[in-house]
Amino acid sequence: MKRKLALWSLPCTLLLAATAHALPPTATPDYEIWISGASASDGFIGELLTELCVDGTLDTYFDDSSNPGRAQRAFFCTIDETQITGGLDVAQPDVLIHKRSAGGSALGVRPVCDKLTGGAGNEDPIDFLQIDTDCVFDNGTGAYLCPPDQLVQVHPDAGVSDVGPGEFTDGLQSSNCDVTNSSFGLVFGILANLRLRDALQSAQGLNVGSDAAADVPSLSTSQIRSILVGNVPTWDRLTFNGQGLNTYAQGLVSNTVNVCRRVPTSGTQTQSQLVLLGSGCIAGALGPAGAPGNPFTGPVVVENSGSGDVELCMQAVEDGGTVDNVGGSTTFQPGMAIGVQSTEKNGDEAFDYRHIRIDGVLPTINNAAKGLYQDWVVSTVQWKFPFVDDGNRDDIVAILDQIVRDAANPAAVASANTNADFVHDWGQGGALALAENGCSTDTTFDIGNPCTPYTRSPGGTPNNCTGPYLLDSESSPSRIEQLLKR
């Protein structure tokens, strides 16, 4: 493992701003905005937020944990009014934007959209990181680290979900959102810790230990599906050239299959069930193997609250160690693990896992945009009116609107994709702008114009069970301005 911590990688200019303590926790913001939900797109949403900041004014806050920012983070800066369509009522306001990732995408739906409905659907406030003088600046991360147990309960203003509000398969979906924006496409992939990656490379005649694109190994959708539903308890059951995969591994102590996945409320988990398993889409399709699995016969299944926890789980299997999870903790012997994660993770290779090919195809945004790679979904941003604090409504809505506009703008998406964690040795990961939101595609994919002509919203509402389909441009005009109308 190259270093102990893996963080959302701030652009160099923003790291310099952070080290200047531009808006420290002693400052009082003009507005606070509370956003909950998906952790898979934390880097992308974080980039869109910080691009609204006046240069040199940004400070970033993480929960102080073994993987800072895995559950909670916040951004404090002066908003550049010129970046907001229509301007703001308060000129150049200081804005503190909270982002809760713990619990995943479902907490970007229910607490947001059901908070004002009354009765049984009236959601309680949820925990956010408290930003105060107990947050201490850390030179190593370029951010303030805040006590993870010092929390404040708030009804979130907006939520981010990797899938549509009605797509969760655990009954936590909501139809009470006033505004749901099909904002961007997020590309996901399958993870293999280094022991598994190297074993696959050896089995497939590739250069073992290489991170080059040509040496990225592959599993088929059928193999991945079999592992995720629990039908491959040990690695010897997966054969290559007539031999069990375990025979290709080096330093293997345990032959048990380990699955590091997310909780049922996670959009990452939901998208893998919809896209890879067909669970929730196809009658009779098998669902994922339940946690904790079987530690004696395999597989071992670990449910993790956030994407940062998945990274810790993958590392624990690689090293042989103990990791906390929603079921308590799990101790591994050095072994091989598979996981699911968005491609905006681990571009800096801070953790000992890598994304692999699916059906021989690299998980790049250009392969997804060209219809060659299937594991991507339409992600959404939603909010409910009126906000709890009605006095800030106009400016808060204007800022949220701008985030959605930028998520639909290929130039802004391309800029966000330059985040170091999105750029891998095998190619560009991250997000896509959607042609259904008005961007124009090129004949040849241009990484500076990451617009895909494919859609998973054929009826105008995200349906990640379907497609992707080429967009019928004649009958599907731009929807972004319609979506933003009140």
Image: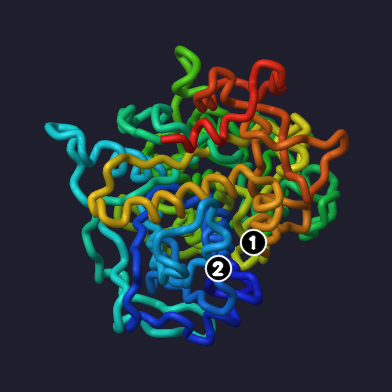
Q: Please, which residue is most extreme toward the left here? A: 119
Residue 354 drawn above or below residue 440: below
Q: Please, which residue is most extreme toward the top here? A: 283
**Image quarter in which the N terminus is found:** bottom right
Question: At 33% across and 51% down in the image, what residue appears?
Answer: 393
All told, the count of numbered labels is: 2
Residue 298 shows up from this direction: no
Residue 180 shows up from this direction: yes
Give coordinates of residue 473: x percent, y percent: 71, 21
Is 187 on the left or on the right of 142, as rendered? right
**Depth-wise, is mark 2 or mark 1 nearer the camera?**
1
Q: Are marks 2 and 1 in contact (CB under 8 Å)?
A: yes
Residue 361 drawn above or below residue 334: above
Q: Residue at label 2? A: 6
Q: Amino acid at mark 1?
A: Asp
Of pointers 2 and 1, the one earlier in the residue sequence = 2
Q: Quadrant of residue 250?
A: bottom right
Rounded to the nearest angstrom, the CA distance separating label 2 from label 1 is 9 Å
Check disc 1 and report its element: helix, strand or loop.
Answer: helix
Q: Residue at label 1? A: 421
Give coordinates of residue 226: x percent, y percent: 56, 29
Check disc 2 and report its element: helix, strand or loop.
Answer: loop
**Image quarter in which the C terminus is found:** top left
Q: Quadrant of residue 288?
A: top left
Question: At 25% across and 71% down in the image, what residue appears?
Answer: 150
Question: At 53% across and 34% down in the image, what residue appears?
Answer: 182
What colour scheme does the image use? rainbow
Residue 58 drawn above or below residue 410: below
Mark 2: few, some, or many residues within 10 Å (few <14, many ≥20)? many
Q: Amino acid at mark 2?
A: Ala
Give coordinates of residue 388: x percent, y percent: 23, 50
Q: Quadrant of residue 238?
A: top right
